[in-house]
Amino acid sequence: MDERLVWRERQRRVLQRCGIFDVCASERVAGDGREGRFTVLEAPGWVNVVAPLPGPGERFLMVRQYRQGIERTTVEFPAGLVEPGEEPAQAAARELEEETGRQAGRWNRLGALAANPAFMTNWCTTYCAEELSPAFPARPDALERLEVLEVPLAELLAGLGGGELVNPMTVAALFWYLRYRARW
Amino acid sequence: MDERLVWRERQRRVLQRCGIFDVCASERVAGDGREGRFTVLEAPGWVNVVAPLPGPGERFLMVRQYRQGIERTTVEFPAGLVEPGEEPAQAAARELEEETGRQAGRWNRLGALAANPAFMTNWCTTYCAEELSPAFPARPDALERLEVLEVPLAELLAGLGGGELVNPMTVAALFWYLRYRARW
């Protein structure tokens, strides 16, 4: 790889604290001497859980919720932030339970992606949760209201990239799940 | 759908202008009367281009670049912001040409995803560019240095979610390309 591609940070300062992330200005210099100032969002990691349901048909536990960024509802796999002191795998088990009221007997890590490599520092780790327990009442966060859905695979494959199926991490997670299941 | 899920905006103000986006505070009220204050990033749309190469083997034009958010290089499909007054399809043709020095004889829109539905307002539209012209010298932006690569499909399928293949839009785009090609 061309070392001139790589930039080194000289200084970083917080411009704005926004609760879920800090907006920072970073002064950097490239391998070939170019200088630049970049905006970077420092944010906590998060997790995404693909939870296929037992029984006939191939259905997944998903959640419908209002998304404040795009001002509409989406249908996504259960997901949430990793809390301080928590490992991503613990966050995945906690979020699955909080959002859907289920526990899983078997967990597998499917992969990790950068939230937005251009200006965000954080990563999203995707897990597969199998051998699901029956549902008990879910405990969503106070400001978070969810509908729990059971969505068939065929509906996901046909609908990804339109309607309510517009979260990139949900698309990536399904792709990984199919790889995990050796579907290609 | 449960109307209590939906939030309405009462007021929005800009907290910080960051060049590539504005950080805003939005006061909102839910259908069931709950009130909340949310941080929203207003950002321009962007585009992503899957460009399969003609000839034997199944290879894709990709770019290696340093990503300031995660402070490492990634390998992604050609991509970039939609400029003011531009349609996404025009931005896709411009970015392909600027980053790889190629034009395409055939374009198809594969789908669109929200950048980050939780707090960003913008969308990424993915196109497939076929019937590629031979390469002429590319014109990357001043602060942007790229290596153009030709990556085989098998390498993408095996490597997604690790190493340099960590951009969620690249993963989603490849998934759509396989759907477009009716691979499942």
Image (cartoon, coloured by chain):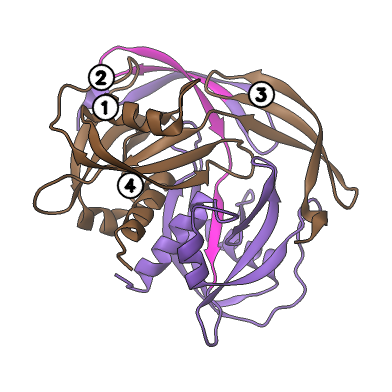
Chain colours: A brown, B purple
Residue A68 position (above or below residue B161) = above
Q: Which residues are magenta?
A: B24-51
The residue lying furthest to the bottom in this view is B56
Q: Nearer the viewer, mark 3 or mark 4?
A: 4
Q: Which residue is mark 3?
A: B16
Q: Are marks 1 and 3 on the same chain?
A: no
Q: Please, which residue is most extreme toward the right here? A: A33
Residue at 33% x, 21% y: name it. Answer: A144
Q: Position of residue A1 (x, y in %)?
A: 75, 61
Q: Is residue A89 above or below residue B153?
A: above
Tell me, yes or no, whether dots 2 and 3 are on the same chain. no
- Marks 1 and 3, how far apart at CA: 36 Å
Q: Chain of mark 1?
A: A
Question: For mark 1, what is the residue?
Answer: A97
Left or right of residue B166: residue A6: right
Q: Secondary structure at mark 2?
A: loop
Counting other residues with Cα less than 10 Å from the Cα at mark 4, is it few (<14), some (14-19), or many (20 or more)? many
Three-letter code for the amino acid on which mark 2 is drawn: Arg
- Left or right of A55, for residue A86: right
Callout in the foreground (2, 4) = 2
Q: Residue at x 57, y 61 (%)?
A: B77
Q: Nearer the viewer, mark 1 or mark 3?
A: 1
Q: Which residue is mark 4?
A: A165
Q: Are marks 4 and 1 in contact (CB under 8 Å)?
A: no
Q: Chain of mark 4?
A: A
Labels 3, 4: one chain: no
- Say which label, 2 or 1, has the lower sequence index: 1
In the rendering, which numbered label is found on residue A139? Answer: 2
Residue furthest to the front in view is A105
